[in-house]
Amino acid sequence: MPLVRRWHYDRGWMWPGVRAGKLTRVFRQLSDRALALTFIALVLAVSLGTARVLGGLILAFSPLLVTLLMLLVVTRDGWRRDGWGRLGMGRLGLRDWPLTLLTTAGVSVLATAGVVVAGLARFATPSGAGLGDLLALCVTGPVLAYAEELGWRGYLLPRLLWLGEGAALLVGGLVWIAWHLPYILLTPYYHHDGNRAAVLGLFACSVLAFSVLFGRLRLRSNSLWPAVLGHFAHNAAFAWLGTYAITTTHPVAVNEYLAGDTGLFVLLGTALSAVLVPFARSAVRTLPPA
């Protein structure tokens, strides 16, 4: 008689007489260190291999895709309801949303005002196209922010905490920098203006600051959603303000070096926010156990 496979929600496809669950139990026994290293290796490999594919769309979603791969294939924790608990999606963390907006969109507003005060730009009246683009940002922005944050602060950060909180936040930031590099170095779509060394230096320092800020928002709220909101609010604010709220004859200085995505003013504001966040009133202070 031909062998017929049977599906088991916790073990996957099994051949009769084959103890397929044994390998699954081995993966389930992997330490957080091993899981973190596996996730990092996979997400960086996908980044390097897909930077030029579909304009970087696969790269943008790779933290989400690798998280699903880890949960549904590698450890199979995702086949159990409690397997999703460490991602932090079970609570909204609403009490930390105002602080999140202040330390992200608020910083971009101050950075934009800074270049105006410095005489490098002037305030402008947004056009109808600006309002349309703002609506588009509010639709697509949260999706892209969620795709990244589910991987960085949802899956990876809790599995780096064996290093200690400070080291976990910095290591996560270094991985985040490395993940971006193929898109920056191999394509013309992202941070391609200005002096390459200066731009990369500002970018690396800013990403480390954002890693600490978003990670601390994640840990203090015990929720993924403040990190998602912060990521989206930063991206939407700097992009819209730089395009529609000001005009400038010094676009590289304003958009790359000072008030853009990872400009100096944004870096300083984000770093200060990351330092001050632990002193703000906190709602919840601990992650759920593994």
Image (cartoon, helix red, strand yellow):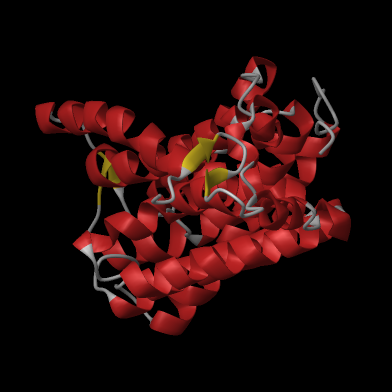
Residue 10 sits in quarter? top right
Question: Does residue 125 lie above or below 152 as drawn?
Answer: above
In the picture, the quarter occupied by the C terminus is top right
Q: Position of residue 228 (x, y in %)?
A: 52, 35
**Which residue appears farthest toward the top when viewing the image?**
95
Question: Does residue 133 lie above or below 112 as drawn?
Answer: above
Which residue shows up at 55% across the image and 29% down it? 101
Is 210 or 199 nearer to us in this picture? 210
Which residue shows up at 25% across the image and 54% down it? 248
Q: Is residue 272 visible?
A: no
Residue 181 sits in quarter? bottom left
Marks counted in the figure total 0
Q: Position of residue 129 (x, y in %)?
A: 11, 32
Please give left or right for residue 221 compared with residue 265 in the image.
right
**Which residue appears farthest toward the front when viewing the image?**
1
**Which residue appears farthest toward the left when viewing the image?**
128
Residue 147 sits in quarter? top left
Q: Position of residue 83 (x, y in %)?
A: 67, 34
Q: Position of residue 95 (x, y in %)?
A: 68, 16
Is 13 or 67 nearer to us in this picture? 13
Which residue shows up at 42% across the image and 67% down it? 46
Which residue shows up at 38% across the image and 64% down it? 256
Question: Does residue 38 lie above or below 63 as drawn?
Answer: below
Is 230 or 68 nearer to us in this picture? 68
Q: Is residue 47 visible?
A: yes
